[in-house]
Structure formats: structure tokens, C-alpha cells
Amino acid sequence: MTAQTAILIGLVIYVILTTVVSFFMMARVRKPTDYLMAGRGLPFWVLTGTIVGTCIGTGVIIGGSGLAYQHGWAGSAYPIGLGLGTLLTGLFFAKMRRYKFMTLSEEVACYYEGNRVVAEFSNVSFFLSQLCWLTVQIMGGAAVLGAVTGLDPRVCVVVTGSAKAMISIPGGLKAVVYTDVLQTIILFFGFGFLMHSALNAAGGLAGLRQTVPAAYFSFLGTSSLGTWNVISLILVLTLNPIADPGRRLTMYSARTETGAKWSMVTSGLIVIVFSVVIGIIGMYTFHINPHLPVVDQTLPWLVMNVLPPWLAAFVVMSVVSGMSSAANGNAAAAGTFFVRHIYPLVTGKYPKRSVMVARWALVFAFFLSTTLALYIGSIVGFVVKFLPLTMGGLAVIILLGRFWKRSTWQGAISALVITPVVSLIVIFVPALVKFWSDPIIPASIAVLLAHVIVSLSTPPARQSFEEVAERMRNERRVIEGESQDNIKKELDEIPVVSPK
């Protein structure tokens, strides 16, 4: 049996299995919170499995291994940044589980008195970020499928997007998390076999070191990629989980606050350890073939040209598992955001049939992300250029809102305006690009200064976090299936708190 045949059989089995699980869970969706929030009852082991799987997606597997092929241990910076950000999110933000938020935008609104501008900017930005990450997962899956089958890249994109949609849409978050646990187990077994095989063939780390450029084995590959580039990559990827609605959705869906905290911390540590695997795979591929024309093909080339058929099939299933876990998480967050924020923003009211609206929103999300995937080039380049435009500023206002009580909504707005302006200036001014490489560091500094200066120049907040959180809770009750008339009657009896 050839490697291609073994891989195709494995992929067919994988897609069938995960689709069956999704439809099985669809039959157990009894109410909107089951679909949107997994009933807010996820235990520690499920949370850890789904968070790890979500972290180790296309960016880590394809982008990280390609970066390791070019710059050695610099490829490990990719999962290190994501793991560190996930760990910090668990330590600093797990307490938000007690407020039963549905989206990260609700949390952000509570930091800034429910200010409409801050809230709606967050809503749209977070929703678009999930569409962009979903695009990345589709790109990665298409790259693997193309390497395996030799099909036209555009066909691979369409097939990948359709397959991921079949897995994600039917059962919502309740299906996503359980398929993610299965996928994470496959992921670690596959990459464990691959790393063992690579080290044996290369003569261990010592043997590998002798066959790649010396700069590859510098600390995090800084001698090869450059210190600023490595710091920027880690920073942008550390900030991403802090401002990632997908991870927050999972955390809000935990059974307990303690489970939310330690599942995030444990997952972050696991992803950081996994960074070693990514670095070894990229350098091992360079050791075998230092002349790959496209670095994003590092792992697919290794699978198709070096590994025995059974290991190739298992590794490809592992790769697809990681990408699908990440795509599932992005899709689940996009659906919840659409129902909770985008639909009301457009129509002026909440949907009466939340689950149906969420499913149609996901159909649109997969269609749009698949279309975008047809026209985007490098995965790492896409991530590094897109994220600073919005995510850097959002991460800063979340951190300041959480830890600095003097933050004001005016400061948050100034930060949100400054972020894309500074990022675009750095991107389009050659001298700044040459100095900074990418915009995350100057953008973060500018955002921090703008937020602090404007906040200190404006009156302090008059509404507490808890007051806004209670208002959010009442708004959510419509989506969660409670009678709108009952809610309106209760709200009419609550005294109005004057806005700032």
C-alpha cells in the first residue's frame, strides 16, 4: 500500500467518525445554551482536551514547522507564544466564569460601563477575527490535502472548507468539544511517533545540530530570524489568547471556575512543551531537504516523501485533527458571537430561534472563510500582519480594564483607534518596517500610552463591573430561551442607573 492510499483511507475514516460524533451530539441539543455554550457544564478533562486542540492548529503545525525549517528553534516561538497567552488567560481571567458571560465582548463591555462604541467595536472585531482564524485553518488543511492528493489547490480549499463545516455546524459547541478531545489524543500520538522517528534518523539532537546551520540552535533561533522578529512573534501570539473569543467561550462554558482556571493553565503548559516537537520537525525536514520551494509545505513534504505509509497516514490524521480542533473552536465562537451581537446589531432584536440562526451564520462563515482562503498566501505572514490591526489593541484594553481601575471608556476608544493607525503606518513605511519588522511592538506601546493618558484625562467610571454584568445577564436571557415578555416585565421594575 502506498503512502497516498493509506493517508486517503485514514482521512475518510477520520471525517466519517467526527461527523458521526457531531450529528450524535446534535440530537442531544435540548436548548440554545447546549448549542452555544455546551450547557455551561464542561469538566476539566474535556476543557483541557479542547483548549490544547484549539491552540495546536494550522498556525502551529504548518506555520510553525515552516518557520523552524527556515530558522530552527524560532519555529518553537509560535506555540510558546500561544501557550504562554493561554496560561496567563487562565490565571488572570478564569474568575469571569462566575458571571456566566456568553462572549468576550460582554466582559469587555463590563470593564467600560457598557459603552456602546467599545462594545460594538469589540463585537465586530472579535467576529471578524474568528472568520480570519477559520480561514487560516482551511488554508492549512488545503495545503495538507494538496500534498497528499496532488489536486488543484483551489479544489483542496473547497473540499477542506466543506469537510470542516460538516463537522462543526450540526452539534455546535457541545459536539465541538468532544470531537476536539478525540482529535487531541490522535494529535499527540501522531506527533509523538513522528518526533521519535525524526530523532532516531538524525542521530538525536546532537546529530541534528551538526546538519543544520549553527544559527538554528541559538536561543529560540534569534541568530537566524532576528531578536526583534522572535520577540514580536511571541508577543503577538501571547496577546492573541488574551483577546481570543474562542478560548473565552470555552472558559465560560466550564462546569466550575476552578476547572476553567486550571484547564487553561494546564493547556498552556502542554502547548509550550509541544513547541519542542515543532522545532525538531522543521529542522529534521531541512536536514533531509534544504531546498523546499515553499516553506508551508515542510510537514506535508516530510509526510509524503520520508515516512512509511502507516506513519504517514497517522501523522496526516494528527495534523488534520489539530487543524479541525482549531477550526471547530473558531466556528463555535463565530456562531455564538453572531447570535449574541451581530444579529441584534443588524436587526435591532435578538433571534427567537437562536440555534437555527447560529447554524445559518456558520454556513455563511465557512463560505466566506473558504473564499478568503482561495486568495491568501503565507500563513505566518497573514497571522503576523492581521492580528496587530485589532487584536493588539483589544488585548491591551482587556488587560487594563481587568487590572487598572482607573481605565475609562474614553481611554479604550482612543486605544482602539490608535491600534490600526500605528500598525498600518509601520506596515507601509519602509524605514519603520526595516527597524521593527512588524507592527505589534510599536502598536502595543502606542496603545498603552494612549489608553493611560486619555483615561487619566477623563472622569473615572461611575458604573461598576457588577452593574453592567447584571444588565448583560438580563439581555442573554432572551437568547437562552426565556420568554421576552417575562424579561421585559422584570426589567421595567429595575431602577435605571444613569450612564456615564
Image: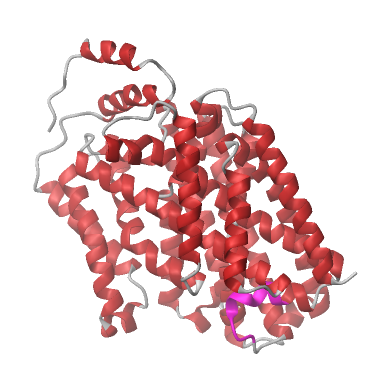
Q: Residue at x 26, y 61 (%)?
A: 419
Q: Residue at x 20, y 38 (%)?
A: 115
Quick one: 137 or 264, which is closer to the camera? 137
Residue 172 rendering spot, x and y as whole percentages: 56, 37
Quarter of the rendering containing residue 75: bottom right
Q: Is residue 244 left or right of residue 47?
A: left
Q: Is residue 368 left or right of residue 22?
A: left
Q: Residue at x 57, y 52 (%)?
A: 326
Quarter of the image for the C terminus: give it.
top left
Quarter of the image for the N terminus: give it.
bottom right
Magenta stretch: includes residue 490: no
Which residues lie in the magenta part?
292-301
Above-or-below relation of 106 to 410: above
Q: Is the stretch drawn in magenta largely helix, strand or loop?
A: helix
Residue 133 rendering spot, x and y as whole percentages: 48, 57
Quick one: 65 or 74, which is closer to the camera? 65
Above-or-below relation of 233 to 321: below
Quarter of the rendering containing residue 294: bottom right
Residue 161 rendering spot, x and y as whole percentages: 57, 57
Quarter of the rendering containing residue 198: bottom right
**Residue 253 in sight here:** no
Quick one: 460 or 305, which is closer to the camera? 305
Residue 167 rendering spot, x and y as whole percentages: 63, 46
Above-or-below relation of 355 to 310: above
**Residue 104 in sight here:** yes
